[in-house]
Image: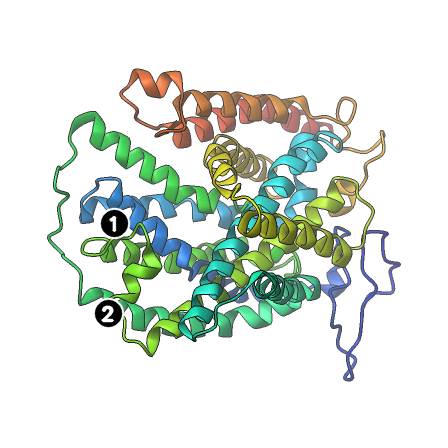
Amino acid sequence: MSSTPLSPAADVPVRGPGGGVRIEAHGIDVIGDEERHGRARQLFGVWAAPNVSYLSLVVGGALVLMGLNLWQALAVIVAGNLCWVLVGVVAVSGPAAGAPSAVIMRAMFGARGNRVVIGINGWFVSVCYVALSWAAASVTAFSLFARCGIELDVVGKVLVIVGIAAVTLVISVYGHGVIVKLYLPLTLVLAVVFVVLAGYVFGHTDWAYRPPEPLRGAGLWAALTGGLALVASAALSYNNSADFARYLPRSTRPAAIAGWTTLGAFVPSVLFTMLGALAATTLDMRDPQTALAGVLPGWFTPVFLVAVILGAIANNAMTVYSSGLALQVMGVRLRRSRSVLLDGTLGVLLTLYALLVSNFLDAVSHLLQLMVVLLGPMMAIYVADIVLRRNRYDGHALSDQTKSGPFWYAGGVNWTGIAALVAGALVAASCLAVPGLYTGFLADAIGGIDLSLPAGIVVAAVVYSAATRPRLAAARRAH
């Protein structure tokens, strides 16, 4: 370990019998070159494990339920998942700065402005996602116990929820090293389970499937664009990919970082979302667990349910890890491990309330559907900034939040970034169409076609680039 004193946001390392670090020592402080390690290909397992998931099956089934035929659904799945390329591009900023995404975004929104942006998108949304995912995993666990003849009472359900959360938080607290080492073997285990599942699904697939009432005209385009936004929203929510690449040596090729990150997420996400669409050609995927159980042998169903729970844990461990870093960036002076535990505790309380007291998760789910108006523009601004700065970030400069720091801008706010985000979000909102929930005036004018994804991304990127390029060019000439 480096002899550099730890920042207030860092953890005191806990060492095992062999002297290895057991808990990640760093929070949002800069990772020194002497502490960089690993290879870009390790990012494949990091991103594959959380995307070998039950949620992908649900999304794939939803596309068919929206009225698309099989081949239309498969095309939407491939196109929507291309947004993982943006996640790969964002990852290259991690080794350049030696800092997580939430810190790097100070370059885009300013030292103070970034706290608000991260508070909404990096922390609040993460906690909501965690609660939704833990709720789904817990319901799956309840079903598993029921298959074993054990009917859980309230105390039993609480213990199950807390148990799933505890496993997740252990991974998150131990941090980056454990995630890198654990996720590749976990990916292989989950892949085997889902390959077996695929064998049974293929046997019940109607490859010539067409909906009873084929969509045409505006209705078809509305389903295609809405499905595209649904698929892409998963990738766009991961503007934290620098968090898991920041320990790589500074000399690591950016193309390798972007490539392995993209490949790790894209391949499993495409395959298992397609599996959900294939299943929906003959099964009622409004209740995927029950539908799939009807075509699976009795011995395999419990294995499948355990895989669902493991996938949710892998996904949430990454999300909680990043939400803990986001909490530090917001100004909460806690060590990373404690900020992770704080966010995890909040997620558990929300999950307990949702499953045992009042089901408010529908409201949370609707809120997250609307968050695409921010997710696309934020990702666009991040990628644009990487391109404009040629991926040159100084982690120590980004950590300087004083008024004389390079990212203080005007009163701690980069109004260019804020303006680009607001412009992109407003245009995206006007083009958004979520049936039964919200339809923007532009979407309504063109028959309910949802163009929020491309509109928000393009507008935010253009506004930010047009305003930022001259300033960066002037700064280069001055030096």
Image height check: is 102 above or below 169? above
Residue 428, how many percent across, how many down? 45, 25
Residue corresponding to mark 2 = 200
| Residue closer to the observer: 86 or 177 | 177
Q: Residue at x 63, y 62 (%)?
A: 162
Is residue 120 shown to the viewer in this render? yes
In the picture, measured across the screen, residue 158 lies left or right of residue 143, that is: right
**Dot label at residue 173:** none
Q: Residue at x 80, y 71 (%)?
A: 14
Image height check: is 221 above or below 196? above
Residue 89, how many percent across, how many down? 51, 47
Q: Amino acid at mark 2?
A: Tyr
In the picture, measured across the screen, residue 378 lies left or right of residue 14, that is: left
**Dot label at residue 74:** 1
- Spatial CA distance of label 2 from label 1 is 19 Å
> Quadrant of residue 400 in the image?
top right
